[in-house]
Image: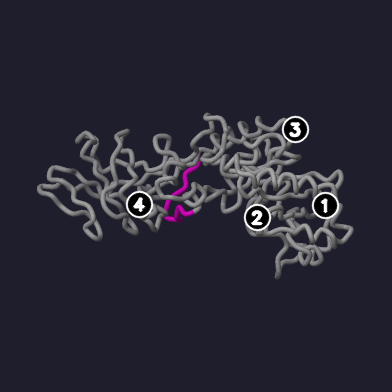
Amino acid sequence: MEAYFGPTIEIDLAAIARNYGRIKSQLSKARCGAVVKANAYGLGAEQAAVALHNAGCRDFFVATLEEGLRVRTRVKDAAIYVFHGFRKGQQPQDFIAHNLTPVLNDIAQIEAWNNAASAALHIDTGMCRLGLTPDDLTRLPPIARTVPLVLSHLACASDPAHPKNKEQLALFKQILNRFPGIPASFANSSGVALGSDYHFDLARPGRALYGITRGTTFPPDMENVVTLSAPVMQYRALTQDETVGYGATTVAKKGSVLATVEFGYADGFMRSLAGKVHGYAAGVRVPVVGIISMDMVSVDVTAVPAHLRTPDLRITFIGKEQPIDVIAEMAGTIGYEVFTGLGPRIKRIYI
């Protein structure tokens, strides 16, 4: 097999496991599950699930049946909940044969499933998205009151002071009176950080496992789990002032040394980062210059010592020096979008 020299994401599975342990330590009584939907936020669901399982996790959450089937191939003895539930065109046997638990979101799903003892119920307490409404609860089939889990989803947990958090909590507690003795799940990553009132029986952190902690009050020792780097394709030493990239939006000065790097917006390096973001080359902070192209970007490496400007030099864009939350803030978005947008051309390396 030929050596690979393109862009890479190094994913520290041990750091994911340690983050799981830190989150679990915040829970006094609740079990700690893990959300691995969207391919574990783009980082590799099968690999993350194994690392989390080895750390003691026995409850996993995915979005779709297909995601659940992939995780089940690697995790044999855990509960796997499917957020989107039992959908048109799917058969109960698709779930039952692989011990997957659909999260039923409306009366039609409950009636189509007709086996609620092996399904969970999702109650909408304020997202106005998927989930049973309070009115739906007045016409639930009796068997739906024997489910193994009732869950809801916080809308504003990343803002601890938002009044919506307490409104949803009060409504969820009121609704749970209809399901005496049945375990409940309410807290996502931010919900865990809101405190024990929100923990109930099963927490389901997602983003914090992967080092996305902006908007939470988690301890500062939560770890970065990703190092994303890309190789230099070519150096250009400028003998005069030159414009750089599409639109000639930036002028690089005479004497600058530019590196063209194999990483662009087709790989998830958002164009909105132009003029804001930088990378690190051999530990030196280096600015991105000009517009980010589809397959490449220019970086000013003038400050990097000449003997280090070799064909083997790599530019790190996400890492300990510049973690995911910093990149997301520069792009005007959230870490989830950055991670899930990292393209398939980037090789995932698990350490």
Q: Is residue 232 left or right of residue 76?
A: left
Can you give x and y, in whole percent of width and height, for residue 350 in the image?
50, 42
Cα–Cα span, label 3 and label 4: 45 Å
Residue assigned mark 1? 147
Cα–Cα span, label 1 and label 4: 48 Å
- Tell me which colouring the rendered structure shows: one colour
Along the line of sight, the residue nearer the viewer: 57 or 103: 103
Identify the secondary structure beneath mark 2. Answer: loop
Q: Which residue is depicted at the point 27% across and 46% down?
A: 299
Q: Nearer the viewer, mark 3 or mark 4?
A: 3
Residue span colored magenta: 341-351
State which tag comes first along the sequence, 3 or 4: 3
Residue assigned mark 4? 263
Amino acid type of disc 1? Answer: Val
Amino acid type of disc 4? Answer: Phe
Identify the secondary structure beneath mark 4. Answer: loop
Residue reaching furthest to the right: 142
Cα–Cα span, label 1 and label 3: 21 Å
Amino acid type of disc 2? Answer: Met
Q: Is residue 262 left or right of residue 55?
A: left
Can you give x and y, in whole percent of width and height, for residue 127 in the image?
65, 55
Residue assigned mark 2? 127
Q: Which residue is depicted at the point 45% across and 52% down?
A: 342
Can you give x and y, in whole percent of width and height, for residue 329 in the image?
43, 45
State which tag comes first along the sequence, 1 or 4: 1
Residue assigned mark 3? 29
Q: Nearer the viewer, mark 2 or mark 4?
A: 2
State which tag comes first along the sequence, 1 or 3: 3
Amino acid type of disc 3? Answer: Lys
